[in-house]
Amino acid sequence: MSERLDVLILDDEPIVGKRLKPALAKIGCEVEIFVNSNEALDRINEKEFDIVVTDIRMENIDGLQVLEHVVKKSGRTKVIMLTGYAMMAVAREAMEKGAFDFIAKPFKPDDLRKIIAKAAKALGSPIDFNASDAGND
Amino acid sequence: MENGKQKELRTLEGHYDRIESIEVARKALLDRKRMSMRFLMYLCFSLVFLIALGTAVILIITNSRVEKKLRFLEITNDLTVEISQARRFEKNFFLYGTNLNDALENIYHAKNILDQNRSELKKILGKDEHERIISSIISNINHYEILIDRLIKTEPSQMVSPKFHSTKKEIEAELRKYGREMIAFAQDLMKKERESLRRILSLSRNLHIYSLIFLLIFLMFVAYLFGSRLLSHINRFTTYAQRIASGNFTPITPTRRYRDEFTDLALAINQMTQELEEHEATIVQSHKMRAVGTLTAGVAHELNNPLNNITITAHMLLEDYDTMNKDEHIDMINDVINETDRSKKIISNLLDFARESSSQVESLGLEKLLRDTVDLASNQLKLSGIKISFQTTGNLPRIHGDGQQLQQVFLNLILNAVDASSKGKKIQILLVPADEPNYVAVKVIDTGKGIPEHIIGSIFDPFFTTKGKGKGTGLGLSVSQGIVGKHGGRISVSSREGAGAIFTVILPITTIPDKIMHQQVLL
């Protein structure tokens, strides 16, 4: 069992965080969830996360601004973008700004777990993806 | 469903009302005596011809009368010459005792002239006049002739007798008397005829002048009649054209007592407005579908959130079903149900708006209508990162109108404002009493790029667009203006480049009975 990954999930839809937290916990992630981007940014300033998962379209501060903030603050943090309807232009912009990957809504929890695993590997601390196996496929 | 059917019925009823009103107008237009412009024109030309013909006939008659008078003058002149000649010989005889046979010859000639022209003179003078004048002349001539004859006969034997001298004197006096009378008669006749000839000639001259003046006045009257009638027709149809252009499709009804060629034009225009109205309905509908298309991107985007929530929740429920307790199961299933409801609402708003329905007039509260419209546009607004606020003074009177069409107008204004604004800007919608009494105003205010002054005059023109090729039809504001115009309202705009724009829609509130308003909007 490798080290636990610190993950921050930011989405203004409360259900996303509520359901993803246990899903990611299963593959060994320590998850903090936020629905308000200001609060999330405050938390990011306090703590360096391994992975930040953020929705792009939100009130006030959107996902791209969060991405810029994270990249500026901590180069090693991997940022995974959640997009609504696949907007290629925005996704490309996110990738150019240094996002690790993006995933289009609606997605299955496993889709996100696969990307988290990929990010963990890139971080040099691979996680056991199969730990979440129960009941999948 | 029930409501939908009812609406459909009422719409159908409205359609029949339209067709019926056009049919009624058609009957009224045709149910008049026909007096075509062509007929009137023929009538006037015929009258002019008749006047000219009458003048010509009178002139021909006068002419022949003049000819007769001239002929008569000629005859009387010949007569006078012969008689004067006879008198000259008579005078010579008494003065110098010259031959008297020549005088007799002249008298004979004079009688001959009267004889030869008897029928002609009778014609000229008329039977009675002829009898009176000619018989007196003839009796004078006869007396004269007898006296001359007596002189000639008595001459050779009694030339020297003293009795002859007195007889001669006697005869001379009598001869002179008859001679004078003959001359006087002939001259009197000539004088009378000359006088009458002068009168006829002056009458003919006056007739010429008067008929010309009459013709001139008549032609001026005809020209004025036709000119003013044509002009009034043209003015009338110009008004119709302007009325139709402003969206009022009321059929043309009769205004004159008789029908003519312009009645055919009116019928054609009534037919045209009916078709125009159908085309307009198509344009309004197709423009609505464009708005629906624009909104669909926002809806599709927004729909992914509840869908994502459902997917994640369902997957986690499947994954952890055995390890979770009943409360957790119920919580997750409730999430799925709520998110499904949310999806339904997102779509149904749009579907309600997209549903095809033609003019449907009812009492409307603008506040609810505007809130619904803001909801409908909200997905699009979220997608563009633009905020919207709606404020009202509240307690405003209701209006009468077609809710769907008005919603289309406001949605169009909001979407235009979205297009003009950049991310982070705000759109404000105000529902307030208008400056004019009995009107309410809806203001759509944006702080976007504004409208340049040189195009602000043409933004309501059909097909005018500032959006790129394939992005705008250029019909939005034109269609909106048409709809608002039909409701008895107006759209106005004020804008400063770089500082945003304010579109103001004013609509009349319901102050008159439903039925009248219903008809007014329907037409």
Image (cartoon, coloured by chain):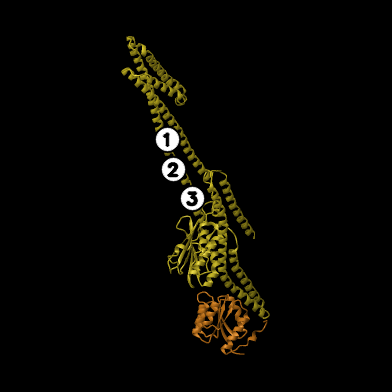
Q: Nearer the viewer, mark 3 or mark 2?
A: 2
Q: CA distance from mark 3 to mark 2?
A: 20 Å
Please check whether the numbered discs 3 and 1 fall on a single chain: yes
Identify the residue position indicated by label 1 in the image.
B207
Q: In what element is the residue under mark 3?
A: helix
Q: Which numbered mark, 1 or 2, is in the foreground of this view?
A: 1
Residue placed under numbered mark 2 in the picture: B220
**Marks 3/1: CA–CA distance:** 39 Å
Please name the residue that numbered disc 3 is placed on.
B234
Q: Nearer the viewer, residue B382 or B138?
A: B138
**Closest to the observer, B221 or B408:** B221
Q: Quick check: can you spot residue B512?
A: yes
Q: Which chain is yellow?
A: B
Residue shown at 65%/78% (left/top)? B315
Say which element carries label 2. helix
Which numbered disc, 3 or 1, marks the residue that appears first in the sequence?
Answer: 1
Q: Percent x, y for residue B505?
A: 49, 60
C-alpha span from label 1 to label 2: 20 Å
From the viewer's perspective, is B79 left or right of B50? Answer: left
The answer to whether tags 1 and 2 share a subunit is yes
Q: Callout 1, which amino acid?
A: Leu
Disc 2 crowd, CA 10 A, few/some/many (<14, 14-19, 20+): few
The answer to the question of whether label 1 and label 2 lie on touching residues, with beta carbons closer than 8 A, is no
Q: Determine contact: label 3, label 2, CB under 8 Å.
A: no
From this view, report whether residue A101 is shown above or below residue B174: below
Q: Give the quarter of the figure containing the N terminus of chain B.
A: bottom right
Q: Nearer the viewer, mark 3 or mark 1?
A: 1
Q: Amino acid at mark 3?
A: Ile
Which badge, 3 or 2, comes first in the chain's sequence?
A: 2
